[in-house]
Image: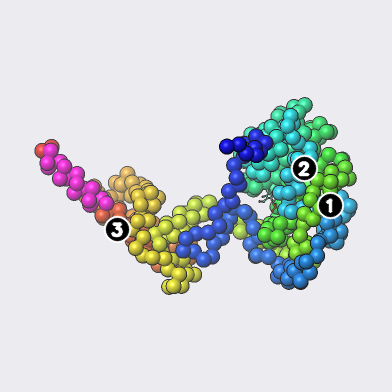
Amino acid sequence: MSGPVARPEVFSVSSYVGGESSLPGATRVIKLSSNEGAFGPPPAALAAMAQAAAQIHRYPDGGMARLRAAIGAAFGLDPARIVCGNGSDELISLLIQAYGGPGTELIMSAHGFAIYEIAGKLAGCVVRKAPEPDLVADVDGVLALVTPATRMVFIANPNNPTGSLLGEDEMARLRAGLPDDVLLVVDAAYAEYVERADYDAGIGLVDAADNTVMTRTFSKIFGLGGARLGWAYAPPGVVDVLNRMRPPFNVNATAAAAAMAALADPDWIVRGRAHNTQARGRLAARPVVLALTLLTRRLREETDEPAPHLTAGDRPARGSATGHLALHHLVPWFIIGFLALAGLRSVGFIPHMALAPAGIAANWLTVISMAALGLSTDLRSVAAAGLRVTAAVTLSLLVLGAISFALIRALGIA
Ligand SMILES: Cc1ncc(COP(=O)(O)O)c(C=O)c1O
């Protein structure tokens, strides 16, 4: 049977798979993969959306004049150089469709934001990735990939998923090293979070010449990811191209209303930035604690221990607990206990005969110290999970021991 056939480029990418956003048995999930704002949407934005919804039978202003004026006022930019999009993803795709295409090359950093590769391949570009030593974009590595076919370079600054960024000097060096006809796209989706003095979101480079674009979004610090609203600050030639490329009503009226209300609250960014800086500091100071916390939570969830905020009614069925206690869930706990034990044994602290009880004690010690370190908000459920693990490990050891013993006897080895 023959049917319509899409361009071969379409099949060079897989359908986008978003990060997981639900967990069986948990009602409050904190999804880290999309970097959504920590405080939810600004209340003023919600109110503005509701108000705009009353007029939703009307088409929006396709040119987004009021919104562009508000963005311009908030960031000190010329509104005529701003184009709004259905998320910055849309603007990135439009730029690639306009400046890329078959026979062209697009350069990104090895761990750059995934959409550049997806949109690049869909447009028929060859996507080249510059190696990233230490998970930071490398200017020399990017410049080394430039060929006569290069049309675009994408740098997310700060980058997602690595979180690393390039200072103003490095970005200027990148721009200076690129041919003038190569479009540099600085994706500054997380610009509002940055506190480093040597950082420029890209505005300086856009102002300095006509071959650099900066993209921004309301999806991150503004907490409006679901509204889908991004914007680009670009030289007049690129603004003209984007306005020709974009669908006439690409930004919806409620999103625009929400964004204007969000911009009107200057404290919102300050609060989000301060919270992020504080949380980042805590996280950076405790990498081991973070790893163990994730381990503990996962174990607790998968052994059916209800999260502390769940009510009795939300409690998942107990029957599946044993099923969840598959060996790979025991392994991390066992390893921690075992390492502690092996350490003590190696310095002769534990006599051979005491190994088994010491093993159980080590498991318990791990549980208690994790709780004491603040790795879990709920000692009872961690302890219960630990108890099950300890019981399961002890039981498995006993069963395995009995089988070995029986085998040795049956085979007459001893
Ligand atoms: C670096 C980067 N650029 C762009 C985007 C897309 O944002 P938007 O929601 O505006 O399409 C994201 C979202 O995850 C991102 O991390």
From what the image shows, is residue 52 above or below residue 165?
below
Residue mark closest to the camera, 2 vs 3: 2
Determine which residue is flagged by label 2. 95
Q: Position of residue 305 (x, y in %)?
A: 41, 64
Dot 1 surroundings within 10 Å: few (below 14), some, or many (20 or more)?
many
Q: Element type at marker 1? A: strand
Name the residue: 77% across, 57% down.
Answer: 251
Does dot 3 land on a helix, a strand or a loop?
Answer: helix
Residue 347 locus on image (x, y percent) = 32, 45
Q: Tell me if residue 72 is in the magenta stretch.
A: no
Magenta residues (range) = 396-411
- Frontmost residue, 16 versus 380: 16
The amino acid type, in three-letter code, at marker 2 is: Leu
Quarter the N terminus occupies? top right
**If you read the primary sequence from the N terminus, does the residue marked by circle 3 or circle 1 appear first?**
1
Along the line of sight, the residue nearer the viewer: 203 or 104: 104
Task: Identify the disc placed on residue 391.
Answer: 3
Disc 3 + disc 1, Cβ < 8 Å: no
Residue located at (35% from left, 50% from top)? 327
Between the residue at mark 1 and the residue at mark 2, the CA separation in whole angstroms equals: 14 Å
Residue lying farthest to the front in this orientation:
1
Question: Contact (CB < 8 A) between labels 1 and 2?
Answer: no
Residue 166 visible to an observer of this rendering: no
398 magenta-colored:
yes
At 77% from the left and 26% from the top, the residue drawn is 148
Residue located 19% across and 44% down the image: 404
Check contact, mark 2 vs mark 3: CB within 8 A.
Answer: no
Percent from the top left, x then y, of residue 66?
85, 61
Q: Position of residue 298 (x, y in %)?
A: 45, 56
Q: Residue tagged by mark 1?
A: 82
The type of residue carrying mark 3 is Ala
The secondary structure that dominates the magenta segment is helix
